[in-house]
Image (tube, rainbow, N blue to C red):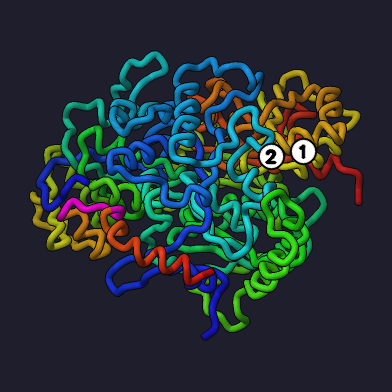
Amino acid sequence: MKKFTKLTSAVVPLNIENIDTDQIIPARFLKATTREGFGENLFRDWRYNGDNTPKPEFVMNNPTYSGQVLVAGKNFGCGSSREHAAWAIQDAGFDVVISSFFADIFKGNALNNGLLPIQVSEEFLAQIFKAVDSNPKSALAVDLENQTVTIVETGAQESFEINPYKKSCLINGYDDIDFILNQKQLIKEFEEGRG
Amino acid sequence: MSKTLVEKIWDAHVVKSEEGFPDILYIDTHLIHEVTSPQAFDGLRKRGLPVFRPKQTVATADHNVPTLNQLLPIKEELSRYQVDMLTKNCAEFGVELYGLGHPFQGIVHVIGPELGITLPGKTMVCGDSHTSTHGAFGAIAFGIGTSQVEQVFATQCLLQSKPKTMKIEVNGELGNGVGAKDIILYIIAKISAAGGTGYFIEYAGSAIEALSMEARMTICNMSIEMGARGGLIAPDQTTFDYIKGREFAPAGEEWDKALAYWETLYSDADAKFDSVLTFDAADIAPMITYGTNPGMGMGIQEHIPATGAQPEKEKLSYQKALDYMGFDDDSSLIGKPVDYVFIGSCTNSRIEDLREVADFVKDKRKADNVTVWIVPGSKQVEQQAKNEGLDRIFEAAGFQLREPGCSACLGMNEDKIPAGKYCVSTSNRNFEGRQGQNARTLLASPLTAAAAAVTGKITDVRNLLEKA
């Protein structure tokens, strides 16, 4: 799995709530059988018209905004369990997603792929949007070791929660399968114990 | 110590619990389908691993399959490739597949219960968020991502933190024309599309206990639409009667042993839930959604809430949803013309749903402006509908009875609603573009959908029912 420790980057702001996984990657693009290439269809129907021409008003089509951090409104990633949503975001060049609230399955999928979901307070999220609004190049500094996210320009900082096991997975690039495989004997004993 | 039902089942499946780590949770049954499994099989190949417990794994093809002429090769190349890949992977790794042409084929959350694979007290997962459906039997069942599908393939376990628990009680009697779908749409409208996040929900109360198994599945199915990991209902005589005699259900001595265990599966009287909500069934009307998440629902006679009444920072998202739907705030949907009616999906495609619709449309005909698709949840449901003559009722009404699959719920196959068109749908999601690019979805019960089909517009079905 991809490792993550720290990052300073400008952000792509998407100030919309309840962004569901059908918006992140519409179902018609789930027919691939590999993990690669989903990035070009990230937010497909917000990004492109029916005739595949870009919609200039969508933030990803505005060259003013770029960066490895996606910032979105609350309840990000609700809906389907498709891991393709996390793959698409990562494939489009993002390493971090920030929101004031994440749907459970999306959050788990992101962590399992080395894409860091950071939950911040509503107030801090509003501060980020405000900073980017006044200066699109406004950068965020993310430090996983110390569990902090900082708006570089203003110095405003907030710490974030992360399961300590998941944190060590991200820092070391381990995944859950590496972890459980080492305990297969325990699993067999559990099965035998149930009769 | 007293425990909730979720805690009882969870604790019985913990292989290892260690401070600072998620629990290693044993998974009894792993259901898979063509869309979220190929990358997981690939992962096994890369690691040189087999499927650890293939006999606890069951596969079907549902998301991508056509709902007409299923025995012909799939026309759409990418869909065909994905379904072929499932067949190949299942053969290579020794997993039982109920693919196209098999009498057990169908939507994964319809076939598990009808085959007696879904049982009380089990842990069940699938790479699909509506796995919560199986909770209707008193099982811990939840949706997972593809990395976790690979994890279960490799180890029959998942690393999972124990969820918080919520009890939702619905008491009293439902009114005429109001069903399970209305109950769950009502609850989601009350607590929002994120109101259950982080929780496992237990549904209880007299209105829930009075429901059939299929109606209970409709309720548990949509737990994910309020963000919950899953939802379940304590098993009772209704549950046991439904299971008995099914294809893979325990029989003979095994049945007696299983039943004795199942009868211990309830939340202890003094068990503590992290959250408890109570609703009155009499307050629930036939429901319909007006926006682009399942929390944007209302009683069919109500007006769409005013944008001005929304919290300041939510106004933009709220208005965006209404603009997408082409609706004005503070207006009624009654009488609004519809273009399509879709009766199907893992929420409402079981035989009782089809019977209810057939009973209502008997001797009626669909309106000329509406296209009606009825997509049964499985081959067995389809066959049963034909045995009961429901197909002839549908045909006479101008409703098209198709072959089983997920179909227009998510429009992965060719069953798509055209841009700008309105579809009253018995499925579970009204997200933008869910049923086709720029399609507009209104979620409702099978009865409300049937009423829209017959009148060609949004209709309060209670006005068309004979007074009870």
Say if mark 2 contacts mark 1, CB within 8 Å: yes
Q: Is residue B343 visible?
A: no
Q: Which amino acid does label 2 sit on?
A: Ser
Give the magenta-colored segment's residue range: A172-177
Q: Is residue A100 left or right of residue B279?
A: left
Q: Position of residue A67 (x, y in %)?
A: 16, 37
Question: Taking A140 as reference, is B264 above or below it?
Answer: below
**Element under label 2?**
loop
Q: What residue type is labelled 1?
A: Leu
Question: Taking A182 as reference, is B327 above or below it?
Answer: above
Q: In this view, does B306 lie to the left or right of A76?
A: right
Residue shown at the point (52%, 51%) measured from the top left: B56
**Element under label 1?**
helix
Residue shown at the point (43%, 61%) measured from the top left: B198
Residue shown at the point (21%, 49%) measured from the top left: A128
Comparing B247 with A55, the one in front is B247
Residue shown at the point (41%, 51%) measured from the top left: B52
Q: Position of residue B147 (x, y in %)?
A: 35, 46
Q: For mark 2, name the chain.
A: B
- The disc, 2 or 1, on the residue closer to the chain's N-terminal end is 2
Q: Where is residue B204 in the image (x, y as percent from the top left)?
A: 66, 67
Q: Where is residue B141 in the image (x, y as percent from the top left)?
A: 53, 56
Crowding around mark 2 (Cα neighbors within 10 Å: few <14, some 14 to 19, many 20+) is many
Q: For mark 1, name the chain.
A: B
Quickly name the residue at label 1: B354
Q: Which label belongs to residue B349?
A: 2
